[in-house]
Image (tube, grey):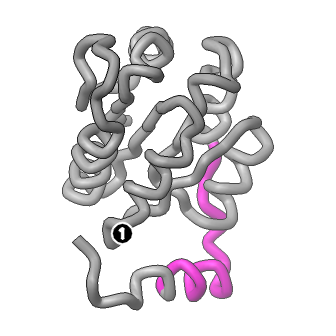
Amino acid sequence: MHIFIGADYRGFERKQALMVFLEQCGHEVTDMGTYEQASGDDFNDSAIAVAKAVRENPGSFGILICDSAHGMTIQANRFKGIRAAHCDSAELAKLAREHDDANVLCLSAHFTDDEKAAEITRAFLETAFDNLERRVRRINRLDEREDYA
């Protein structure tokens, strides 16, 4: 599975640890930045890079990490075809995949340690979309806007 991963300076260390975990699980991982822990960078850059990469590579997933996960989630969801979900537990990650076919997982560096991040990520990546008609219909409605990036 191809995974694009990005973080801001607050999520940098969590991203580095999660990349090792993902590679040990056999996933192909592409680091979309930030590439150093330099205070003051903008979360937007990594979120935009990951969202575009996931959109351009069907079947891939994205993972974004910042302090709260809110900014990353908001930024990624500005892109048509991206369904970014901020998940603080494995249960929420499963629901994001099963019900909403989320393709970008957003994690909080502040509230999630390395072990919990790995647990949430595993649940997200191992859960399939429950392809019910009502869920497909609802997901298709997410992209009805015309002013997406």
Total marks placed:
1
State the image coordinates of residue 42 (x, y, percent, origin top left). Answer: 30, 36
Query: Please, is residue 40 above or below residue 88 in the view?
Result: above
Where is mark 1, residue-wise?
A: 81
Query: Please, is residue 7 above or below residue 91 in the view?
Result: above
Residue nearest the observer in this picture, 22 or 5: 5
Query: Please, is residue 20 above or below residue 65 in the view?
Result: above
Residue 2 visible from this viewpoint? no
Residue nearest the observer in this picture, 52 or 3: 52
Q: Residue at x 50, y 87 (%)?
A: 141
Tell me, yes or no, whether the highlighted magenta stretch contains residue 136. yes
Q: Residue at x 34, y 32 (%)?
A: 6
Left or right of residue 38, residue 10 in this image: right
Residue nearest the observer in this picture, 41 or 54: 41
State the image coordinates of residue 109 (x, y, percent, origin top left). Answer: 57, 24
Tell me, yes or no, whether the highlighted magenta stretch contains residue 113. no
Left or right of residue 84, residue 52 in this image: left
Residue 90 visible from this viewpoint? yes
Q: Secondary structure at mark 1?
A: loop
Left or right of residue 88, residue 72 in this image: left
Query: Please, is residue 108 above or below residue 36 in the view?
Result: below
Magenta residues? 127-140
Neighbourhood count class around disc 1 (C-alpha, 10 Å): few under 14, some 14–19, many 20 upward: many
